[in-house]
Amino acid sequence: MSNAALTPELIRAALTTVKYPGFSRDIVSFGLVKGIEVTPEGAVTIDLVVESKNADVPRFIYQSVMTEVKELPGVKKLDVNIRHIEPDVKKKQGINDDPAAWKTVVPGVQHVVAVSSGKGGVGKSTVAVNLAVALGRLGYRTGLLDLDIYGPSMAQMCGTKEQPGCNEKEQFLPVEVHGIKMLSMGLMLDEAAPVAVRGPLATRYVQDFLRDTDWGALDVLVLDLPPGTGDIQLTIVQTVELAGAVVVTTPQETALIDARKGISFFRKVGTPLLGLVENMSYFICPTDDTVHHIFGRDGGELEAQRQGIPLLGKIPLDMRTRTCGDEGHPVALEDVGSSRVAAAFLGVAGMLADRLGL
Ligand SMILES: Nc1ncnc2c1ncn2[C@@H]1O[C@H](COP(=O)(O)OP(=O)(O)O)[C@@H](O)[C@H]1O
Ligand SMILES: [Mg+2]
């Protein structure tokens, strides 16, 4: 027997290098791996379920898994069982989780990251815009798409009312602001109009935005989703090849209850959870520097641990964050030496970039 213990975890890690054919996402994050067994003698059994109309897909995956695992130290025997399911049955029930059948890649964009929250008002848009700006500051080519049509606030938070342009292919051209490219559904709508696009039309708009925008080459596209787990969220996870989701919560129990629902939604649909951001974590009194845990202490951090999701950072409750948002100059642009919040957002951006392998 080899000295480095061969474990299912080790094999799972090796399987994360096997990409789903035609996608940059791996078979583990797509949820294809249903079981891994290892005997002390080094006999490995891997069970996979592949749902695809295309019989080449399981064949290709089989070969890649064989190649990847067979060479691991300690593997004496390897069985890869693939159950190939035609997607029709699920399709009849309105479920289709054959990624090749519907996931679209946003042209030119390397990683699409959805920022989500279970509950409104926890600072999801604030985190989305500052995360995007911080990624830009770190040198990543970053876009920001505001899909929160129920409360679009991005234009305000970015301080621009510039209407997006249009290229010769009749695609939207995002607005360039604070070192990032930004497009907001709110910018395109008359201030009184959002009501008209709620419901069934909303998901159509979202698909149009994703398909028909010329982002150029981007390292990361940050999506500001509406709160909750409704139709728009479902459309996005079903139609876009997401690198994953970032969940925003405050440490407060009522926010955490909804964050858990969001997390289980992403788990159910197989969207990787990139991490959790605890917003409004604490308040530092400007007069005497005392720390106050206004919304409770460590709620987000403990939840992240419980869920096995990385904590990307804790953002303090801070007056400048709010006023910067209102003034259209995101706080993440401030000097990190004097702004604790800017430093916190750069930390979150750095951790996220790491998670994305940038
Ligand atoms: N860390 C923070 N410190 C101070 N104010 C914040 C912070 N995060 C968000 N806010 C403020 O809270 C309000 C709600 O934030 P917003 O980002 O619009 O939430 P959501 O998009 O989740 O509804 C805004 O007025 C915003 O400026
Ligand atoms: Mg918002």
Image (cartoon, rainbow, N blue to C red):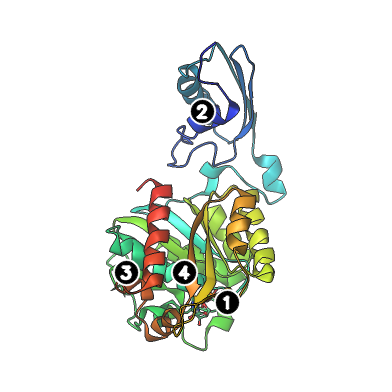
Q: Which mark is residue 121?
A: 1
Tell us which disc is closer to us: 4 or 3: 3
- Distance from disc 2 to disc 3, alpha carbons, whole Å, reads 46 Å
Write the residue at 42% across / 62% down: 222
Residue 240: x %, y % from top left: 49, 54
The amino acid type found where label 3 is placed reads: Val
Q: Is residue 356 left or right of residue 34?
A: left
Q: For disc 1, does the CB lie below 8 Å from ligand 1?
A: yes
Q: Which structural element holds mark 3?
A: loop
Q: Nearer the viewer, residue 342 or 76?
A: 342
Q: Which mark is residue 127?
A: 4
Q: Which structural element holds mark 1?
A: loop
Q: Nearer the viewer, residue 334 or 133?
A: 334
Write the residue at 36% across / 54% down: 107
The amino acid type found where label 1 is placed reads: Gly
Which residue was labeled with disc 2?
A: 61
Q: Which structural element holds mark 4?
A: helix
- Distance from disc 3 to disc 1, alpha carbons, whole Å, reads 25 Å
